[in-house]
């Protein structure tokens, strides 16, 4: 009955808002629609999960509801360009300029950019790998070039450090680790997660800054064990690892800025929630406003089509 109510009012109220009010899951609603389509037989067009039926021109009041719902769902991360694309993906027809003006009139503004200091220490005598990446951030296939870095998050219990591994192909976070100390173990745990999840072929390039964690003997041995090639940024040049810097900026600006965490556990939960959102939902301008996972799925579908 609840899903039927959502279906009847899907052109008026956002699905995610209705599901939240009715205390049902949006994914369950889409599965319900799929079952309906299957029961209707082959003559009825299939409805894909996560797809929305296009609706006619909405009134300003109805559009404002959708805009507020997306803004709340994305926790203030989206400005009007991403907001317009998200609405379009949901079948909400509205011009770019109309969405921009309405966001302004509603007082909805994406969080602004902030600068954050570096965390790793490159003042050491450990071996430095050559810069194999050379700022070539465009990669034509998954699991060919990964990048890694560390950032920090303040909690009432002290600092929480986050290490990530990103696949440059689709900007996906393929591995991460969090801990109380900024040690080589932290970055090694992030790399292990990425390797066990992806199992890349030998020869993958792993790029990082010159931090002592990445230059340590243990980390370099782990790269050899995984048959990866080490690459490091030039001294003091954060632009050589700009992708991870951008990721951390998005995390802190879009989600963590202004939040206070009473414990490291609370901060970890928020970071993990954002990483899931980032990988599966967040529209990435570099990827043609697709999420990292959607971008890779489209690429895989093209490879299968070409091989057929």
Image (spheres, helix red, strand yellow):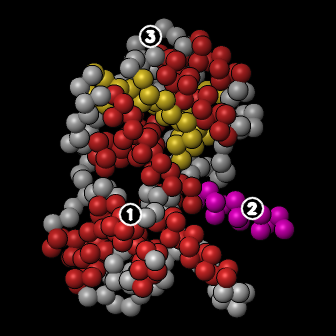
Q: Quadrant of the C terminus?
A: bottom right
Q: Residue 269 at x, y = what percent?
A: 39, 38
Comes first in the chain, label 1 or label 2: 1
Q: Which residue is mark 3?
A: 124
Q: Secondary structure at mark 1?
A: loop
Snapshot quadrant of residue 63: bottom left
Q: Nearer the viewer, mark 1 or mark 3?
A: 1
Q: Which residue is mark 1?
A: 23
Residue placed most toward the observer, 176 or 166: 176
Q: Residue 209 at x, y = what percent?
A: 47, 27
Q: Nearer the viewer, mark 1 or mark 2?
A: 1
Can residue 306 be found in the magenta stretch?
A: yes
Residue at the location (38% across, 83% down)? Answer: 9
| Span shown in magenta | 295-308
Around disc 1, counting alpha carbons within 10 Å, would you say few (fewer than 14), some (14 to 19), or many (20 or more)?
Answer: few
Q: Residue 168 at x, y = what percent?
A: 56, 45
Around disc 2, counting alpha carbons within 10 Å, would you say few (fewer than 14), some (14 to 19), or many (20 or more)?
Answer: few
Mark number for residue 303? 2
Q: Secondary structure at mark 3?
A: loop
């Amino acid at each position: 009955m609840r899903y039927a109510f959502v279906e009847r009012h899907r052109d008026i109220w956002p699905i995610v808002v209705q599901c939240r009010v009715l205390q049902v899951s949006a994914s369950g609603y889409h599965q319900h629609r799929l079952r309906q389509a299957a029961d209707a037989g082959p003559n009825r067009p299939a409805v894909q999960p996560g797809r929305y039926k296009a609706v006619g021109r909405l009134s300003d009041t109805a559009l404002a509801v959708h805009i507020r719902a997306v803004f709340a769902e994305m926790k203030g991360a989206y400005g009007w360009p991403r907001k317009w694309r998200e609405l379009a993906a949901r079948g909400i027809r509205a011009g770019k300029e109309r969405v921009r003006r309405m966001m302004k009139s509603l007082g909805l503004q994406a969080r602004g950019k902030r600068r954050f200091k570096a965390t790793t220490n490159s003042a050491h005598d450990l071996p430095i790998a050559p810069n194999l990446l050379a700022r070539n951030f465009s990669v034509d296939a998954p699991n060919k070039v990964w990048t890694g870095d560390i950032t920090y998050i303040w909690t009432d219990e002290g600092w929480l450090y986050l290490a990530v591994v990103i696949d440059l192909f689709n900007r996906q976070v393929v591995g991460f680790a969090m801990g109380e100390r900024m040690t080589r173990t932290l970055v090694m745990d992030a790399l292990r997660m990425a390797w066990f999840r992806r199992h890349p072929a030998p020869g993958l390039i792993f790029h990082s800054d010159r931090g002592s964690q990445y230059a340590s003997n243990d980390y370099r041995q782990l790269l050899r064990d995984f048959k990866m090639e080490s690459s490091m940024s030039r001294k003091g040049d954060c632009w050589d690892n700009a992708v991870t810097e951008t990721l951390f900026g998005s995390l802190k600006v879009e989600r963590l800025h202004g939040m206070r965490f009473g414990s490291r556990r609370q901060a970890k939960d928020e970071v993990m929630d954002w990483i899931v959102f980032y990988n599966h939902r967040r529209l990435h301008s570099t990827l043609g406003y697709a999420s990292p996972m959607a971008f890779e799925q489209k690429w895989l579908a093209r490879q299968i089509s070409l091989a057929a």
